[in-house]
Amino acid sequence: MRFLPIVERELRVGARRRSTYSLRLLAALVAFVICLWLCLIPTRGQPPTVLGKSLFGALSTAAIAYCLLIGPFITADCLSSEKRDGTLGLLFLTDLSSLDVVLGKWVATSLAAFYGLLAVLPSLGIPLLLGGVTPGEYGRVALAVVNAVLFSLTAGIFVSVLNRDQTKAILGSLILVLTLSGLLPGLIALVVGGFLGLGQVNPLTSPVTLFSPIYTLQFAFDATFKANPRHFWISLGVVQALGWLFMIAATVIVGRAWRQEPGGPRQSARWLLRLGWTRRWERRFKRRLERNPVYALASRQRWPHWVFWVLVGIVTINIYWLTIGLRKHPNVYAFHQNFSLAMYFINRVWIAAMAARFFGEARRTGALELILTTPLKVGTILRGRRRALLRLFFWPVLAIAFLHWCYLWGSSQPSPNQPNNAAMFRVHAIMATGSLVSFLTDVLALTALGGWLSLSSKKSHLVILKTFILVTLIPWLVYFLLSSSGWLMRLPATTYLASWPMMMVTKNLLFLAWASYKVRRHFRSAAAETYGLRRWRWRLRRAAEEAGVGVGTVGPLAPAKE
């Protein structure tokens, strides 16, 4: 028997996969845009050494963000999909071991991520030519980002072994990576310095930061490395050990996980442990099934409601510390600002996952084709899904809107650190209103685009990532680059504060209109996986006519039967 046969096979298959090279091209393109932008706009006219340091810092930040975010989206569903389909046990009927299965699936999904990082690493060497960056610093940063992508990918496959549902696996791995990377060190510093009153804690000297890939990158820079070189090497080893620990745990668990049968709702004696699945809920489900079967099927799960309310509770605690708790402990402001950004991304990922969940699961199980054979009209199907999402999102979104008002009220209270309280209240009012409006339109855009992509995309495991990138990540990066260039700073203060919600609302309305039109116009062809075939057939016919080749009556060049 050959050594690691699945790994060898998956490497051959991945080398022929187009997405492997497209991700590498996209990563190289993003690095090129960052280099071009920083060289021409914000740092224009600066000395080469200053430009080299600025460019190296921006590229390092982009590289570590890519490494930490790519893992939860591409490896978190590699084993959970096998468990859902019931094919994981078939692999163990052969001579394959748990190590063969885990490494094979991990290599199959991780190859594209490594190719993308391979395109970014040469761009990190450009600042070496400009000056301001030493070869040792470049080598340490390269080691840190490679270590980070290994950590992220192994964390994703570890969570994938523990879950059967795609949404739970992606969200769980994202939370695990973000918690160990930045939230846990900041939380420890907050508890020790704020609650216990033991003095302000420097995160760079805390032992918890050794588990964070972000702080490994921070230790790699010359300014920090020269102060204490051991911190970098210890943190590099600890993060590498975490990656191996995730991989070993996944290998041990997968041998037992395939024997677990898929279970229904938990029949516990306590209502809380059953996540609200009661007889009253079952009666309500039967009534919905008679009224609109799509609405009943799309809203039959109770756990998404609980997850959404947990996220709302976390946001509530963060709002408290940004308003009231800030007066007693002003040193925690930076942590809660970064925490707010992390929750911003987590909430959008969660909304995108819920938007793509119903159609994605229906396509995977074949239920969507069965629905199309029923007398249900397309409008009825879309109304059922829309009503299920409205039931899921309405009360949590209303609670988040109320939290925006609470933030505004807390910011309006007198504070000794704000001598001009009226002006600060005006600033917070514009920010809170803009944040609320952009959040509401974000929900509409994510649900519309996620629904269409889950129908039309052939790669269902990338639907959540595509929706998140198009609606949230790319607009945020564009606004960040515009802000760093100084163009927006030239605007009046009120216009500058309103520029972000104006851009977000415009973008969201465009996505909403486009996705809604696509769903209404091409629902049946997308659900039957024939969307786009007629367009390619027309192009082939036109190319054949231009070449003087007659169009046959059968085959791919045959005219479509209406």
Image (cartoon, helix red, strand yellow):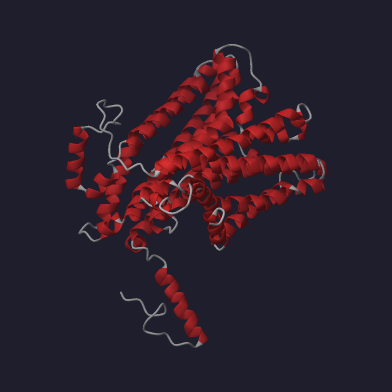
Who is closer to the viewer here, 230 or 406? 230
Query: Horizontal and vertical percent for residue 226?
Result: 79, 30
In the image, farthest residue toward the top: 197
Q: In this view, does 417 lie to the left or right of 73?
A: right
Who is closer to the viewer here, 150 or 260? 260
| Residue at position x 39%, y 79% in the image | 555
Question: Which corner quadrant of the image does residue 424 belong to?
Answer: top right
* Above/below status of 434 relative to 419: below
Judge whether residue 423 can be spotted in this image. Answer: no
| Residue at position x 80%, y 43% in the image | 135
Judge whether residue 274 can be spotted in this image. Answer: yes
* Above/below status of 418 relative to 25: above
* Above/below status of 296 relative to 536: above
Who is closer to the viewer here, 337 or 15? 15
| Residue at position x 46%, y 37% in the image | 172
Tally the marks: 0
Query: Horizontal and vertical percent for residue 527?
Result: 34, 60
In the image, farthest residue toward the front: 1
Query: Horizontal and vertical percent for residue 390?
Result: 32, 41
Question: Which corner quadrant of the image does residue 277 belong to?
Answer: top left
Q: In this view, does 496 lie to the left or right of 346?
A: right
The quadrant the C terminus occupies is bottom left
* Above/below status of 92 relative to 217: below
Query: Horizontal and vertical percent for residue 45?
Result: 80, 45
